[in-house]
Image (cartoon, rainbow, N blue to C red):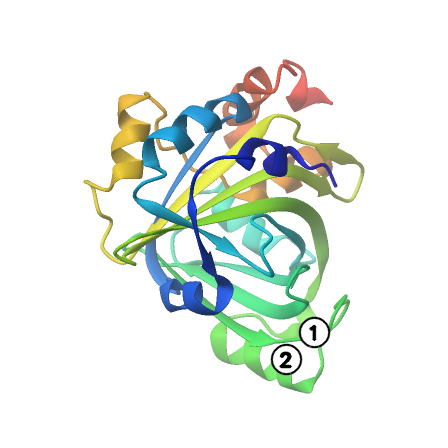
């Protein structure tokens, strides 16, 4: 995996916060705001907000590697629900937190009030199917049984996590994103996905105010849905067509939708 984030963060001036302290701001029930833009925007952003935020570290590493496996039904119910704009929808994934060697089976539920609720259970590394406990977890937390699910997408990325100093907001910044799907793999060179997570959707946070002033507008970005739309040529994707074209312009890949 590339090291874009390490280069960008060199000499940034953020104070550090170790993982064991940062976990108090897990935001498992939250309001999300997502932004995506070119990586060249990050140095100016960091310069403005560095006095208000801490950067999460694991053994003094300020960027962490993530790997994800997503699961869906044979008829792609979870992807289709999102594509069709249905609320009260699920994402089911196995995530490897590579640097901390943690592995979780995670369920994300987006309810009709715009809140994201995440539940997870410790899991085995490189999950390809589900054991009895994991199956019970899925039946309790979703409308899907483990026997309905199969691997549908993989991704990997580098993440920076910022915590504001009053511990009311968490920000994740993902770069070096790569999708590996049914038909092909695509590297999202130069793209940043920034996600603001807070319990009450603070409109006056320093980071949100900077994004507004820099005219970096909030826009949804589901890694699962965009990844599926880019790497699986057999599924419906017209709802994401314009977004993918806009992403392609940022990446200087105007033909991204047809790659």
Q: Position of residue 247 (x, y in %)?
A: 55, 24
Q: Quadrant of residue 14?
A: top left
Query: What element does badge 2 sit on?
Result: helix
The reply to whether discs 1 and 2 touch (Cβ–Cβ < 8 Å) is yes
Q: Is residue 89 above or below residue 227?
A: below
Image point 65% across, 69% down: which residue?
A: 103
Question: 114 or 22: nearer the eye?
Answer: 22
Q: Which residue is mark 1?
A: 147
Instruction: Inspect this view and state whether residue 236 appears.
Output: no
Q: In what quadrant of the picture does the N terminus appear?
A: top right
Answer few, some or many: residues within 10 Å of disc 1's Cα (few below 14, many 20 plus, some between 14 and 19).
Answer: few
Image point 61% across, 25% down: which residue?
A: 190
Which mark is nearer the camera, 1 or 2?
2
Quote the CA–CA distance across marks 1 and 2: 8 Å
Q: In what quadrant of the picture does the C terminus appear?
A: top right
Q: Position of residue 227 (x, y in %)?
A: 64, 40
Image point 22% across, 55% down: which residue?
A: 200
Q: Position of residue 156 (x, y in %)?
A: 68, 47
Q: Quadrant of residue 219?
A: top left
* Mark identifier at residue 175: none
Question: 50 or 139: nearer the eye?
Answer: 50
Q: Which residue is mark 2?
A: 135
> Extreme right residue here?
183
Q: Quadrant of residue 58?
A: bottom right
Instruction: Inspect this view and state whether residue 16 appears.
Output: yes
């Amino acid at each position: 995996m590339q090291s874009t984030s390490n280069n960008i963060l060199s000499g940034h001036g953020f104070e550090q916060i170790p993982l064991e302290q940062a976990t108090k701001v897990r935001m498992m029930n939250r309001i999300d705001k997502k932004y995506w833009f070119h990586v060249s925007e990050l140095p100016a952003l960091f310069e403005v907000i560095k006095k208000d935020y801490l950067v999460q570290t694991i053994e003094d590493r300020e960027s962490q590697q993530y790997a994800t496996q997503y699961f869906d039904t044979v008829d792609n119910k979870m992807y289709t629900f999102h594509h069709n704009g249905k609320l009260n929808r699920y994402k089911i994934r196995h995530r490897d937190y590579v640097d901390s060697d943690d592995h979780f089976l995670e369920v994300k539920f987006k309810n009709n009030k715009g809140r994201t609720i995440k539940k997870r259970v410790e899991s085995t590394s490189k999950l390809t199917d589900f054991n009895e406990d994991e199956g019970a977890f899925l039946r309790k937390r979703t409308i899907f049984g483990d026997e309905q699910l199969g691997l549908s997408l993989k991704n990997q990325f580098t993440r920076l996590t910022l915590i504001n100093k009053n511990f009311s907001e968490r920000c994740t910044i993902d770069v070096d994103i790569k999708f590996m799907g049914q038909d092909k793999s695509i590297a999202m060179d130069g793209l940043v996905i920034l996600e603001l997570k807070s319990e009450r959707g603070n409109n006056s946070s320093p980071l949100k105010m900077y994004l507004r002033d820099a005219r970096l507008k909030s826009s949804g970005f589901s890694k699962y849905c965009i990844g599926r739309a880019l790497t699986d040529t057999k599924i419906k994707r017209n709802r994401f067509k314009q977004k993918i074209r806009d992403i392609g312009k940022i990446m200087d890949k105007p033909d991204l939708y047809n790659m």
